[in-house]
Amino acid sequence: MPVTLLPPITYGIGRTDAEPLDTAPRFVRTGGMSRWHRPRSGVRTADDRTVYSVWCGPQVGGLHRARPLLTTETVTDGLPVCATCDGRAVGAGQEENGPAGRRLVFGPRSLTPPRWCPGSRRGLYEPLPGGTTGRCLACSDSHPIRAMGGPYAGRVAIVQHPPGPALFEPCPFHRWRHPAVADGRLVCVCGRPLTSPQ
Ligand SMILES: [Zn+2]
Ligand SMILES: [Zn+2]
Ligand SMILES: [Zn+2]
C-alpha cells in the first residue's frame, strides 16, 4: 500500500515546472544510502524524473544516474530505517499510530492556513463603491482600506484581517505565502493560478 504524500512545499520563490505527486512507496533510498527513509512529498520533474523529499530533510532520487532511486513497501534487505523519518511520518498521521500510551505527534506548521490573510496590508483588493472599503482578492471578504507607509512611501492597502472562508486554495509549493495579481487574476509567485474553494 502506498502512502499519501504532503504537498511539496518549498521556500524558494522560483518558477517550477514540476508536478506534485499524491502518493509514494513507503520507503525510499538511493543506492548510496545506508538506511531507508520515508517520503514526505514528491514531484515529477518536466524531464520525467521522480524526486522525493523525505521527512528528515534531503531530497532523494532523480539526481544521480549512478545511484538509482530504490523504493519498497516493506524493508526486507536488513538495512535500518531512519528514525527521524519514521517518527515524523507516524506523528504526522501518514502512518498508523502506535498503541495507546505511546502516541507520536508531529505537526508540520506550513500545512495550516495563516492567522492573517495574505492579502492583509497589501494592494490585493478591488475597491468598493464609496472608496473606503475593498474586497480582498485573496479571501473575498470586505474590509476598510487605509493609507499605509510613511509620507515618502505611501500606499493604500486593505487592513490586516483574518482569512475569510473563501481564502484561496494553497499552492502546493508556496502555500499561502506569495499571492499576486497578474492580468487581473490571482496567481502564485510561481505562476500557478490560485482559486477559491468551491
Ligand atoms: Zn530520513
Ligand atoms: Zn483577505
Ligand atoms: Zn506557487
Image: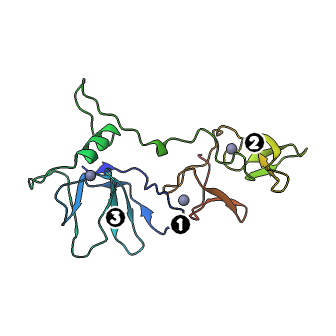
Q: Mark 3 points at which residue?
A: 51
Q: Mark 2 points at which residue?
A: 159
3D distance between C-alphas at marks 1 and 2: 28 Å
Q: Mark 1 points at which residue?
A: 14
Q: Do the residues labelled 3 and 2 touch (CB within 8 Å)?
A: no
In the picture shown, does residue 7 fall above or below 86?
Answer: below
Q: Do the residues labelled 1 and 2 touch (CB within 8 Å)?
A: no
Q: Which residue is drawn at 54% across and 62% down?
A: 13
Kind of residue sitting beneath label 2: Val
Which is more N-terminal, label 2 or label 1? 1
Q: Where is residue 35 in the image (x, y as percent from the top left)?
A: 18, 55
Foreground tag (3 vs 1)? 1
Task: Compare residues 30 and 128 and report the one nearer the observer.
Answer: 30
3D distance between C-alphas at marks 3 and 1: 17 Å
Q: Position of residue 175 (x, y in %)?
A: 53, 51
| Residue positioned most to the right | 130
Q: Where is residue 122 in the image (x, y as percent from the top left)?
A: 72, 51
Kind of residue sitting beneath label 3: Val
